[in-house]
Image: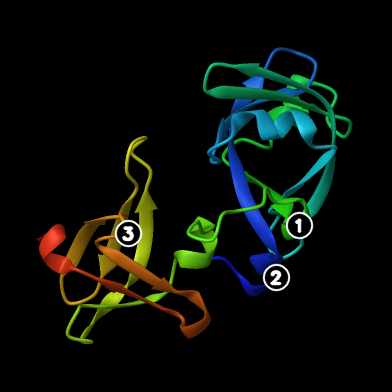
Amino acid sequence: MMNTAMHNYLKIGKIAAAHGIKGTVKVIPLTDDITRFQNLTHVFLNDCDMPQKLTIQKVQLNENIVFIKFDEFNNRNEAETLKNNFLYIDRAHAVPLNDDEYFIEDLIGLSAYDLDNINIGEISDIIQTGSVDVIVITGKKKYLIPALKKNVSVFIDQGMIKVDISSGVDYD
């Protein structure tokens, strides 16, 4: 689970590798709108408890990959130190959501209850499949529940969701 200092930030990408010799990095986007990177002037690198602000010099999109050149990194060796780190934005720069949409960071850790109000665990992950996201609930059993309105009701203010477990799969 994300540390408290990072709660004001949203994860938008993971640095996969250095690219080229000038300090560019290859980023796997963790956002539904890959073009959102083109509108950013900076991002934050999760560096332990203190996020580091990075200034974006250039963004290039290539299908489902983003290439970013930061002002702070000028060669491949420097860029390689960023591998496997996550990129974040502050919530003030987040894309506005519709009423029935949520940021994954806001769902992870919520308590999960079945339709009989029995606690079955908590959300441990969201698997993005491309068509329908799948909620992973971990408790005494592990459940995979399709994130459809008919299966899931979200109550973020109460720190919980209600799910129809018959719509998913349980496995140990």
Q: Give coordinates of residue 20: x percent, y percent.
A: 70, 12
Residue at the spot x=64%, y=55% of the render?
Answer: 10
* Residue for badge 3: 149
Q: Is residue 45 above or below residue 77?
A: below
Q: Position of residue 42 (x, y in %)?
A: 83, 41
Amino acid under label 1? Pro
138 or 83: nearer the eye? 138
For the C terminus, the image quarter is bottom left
**As shown in the figure, which amino acid type bears the numbered disc 2?**
Ala
Classify 11 as above or below 69.
below
Any mark on residue 51, and which? 1
In this view, the residue in front, 28 or 104, is 104
In the displayed structure image, the side of residue 44 where residue 67 appears, left or right: left
Looking at the image, is 2 positioned above or below residue 13? below
Q: Which residue is mark 2?
A: 5
150 sits to left or right of 128: left
Q: Is residue 45 left or right of residue 16?
A: right
Residue 92, percent from left and from top:
78, 57
Residue 64 in view (yes/no): yes
Camera-nearest residue between 133 and 41 = 133
Q: Secondary structure at mark 3?
A: loop
At x 32%, y 43%, the residue is 132
Which mark's residue is nearer the viewer, 2 or 3? 3
Q: What residue lies at 32% left-to-right and 59% top-to-bottom?
A: 149
State the separation of the CA atoms marked 1 and 3: 35 Å
33 or 26: nearer the viewer: 33
Residue drawn at point x = 66 percent, y = 28 percent: 35
Q: Residues within 10 Å of mark 3 (few under 14, many from 20)?
A: few
Q: Are discs 1 and 3 less than 8 Å apart at CB?
A: no
Q: Residue 72's image quarter?
A: top right
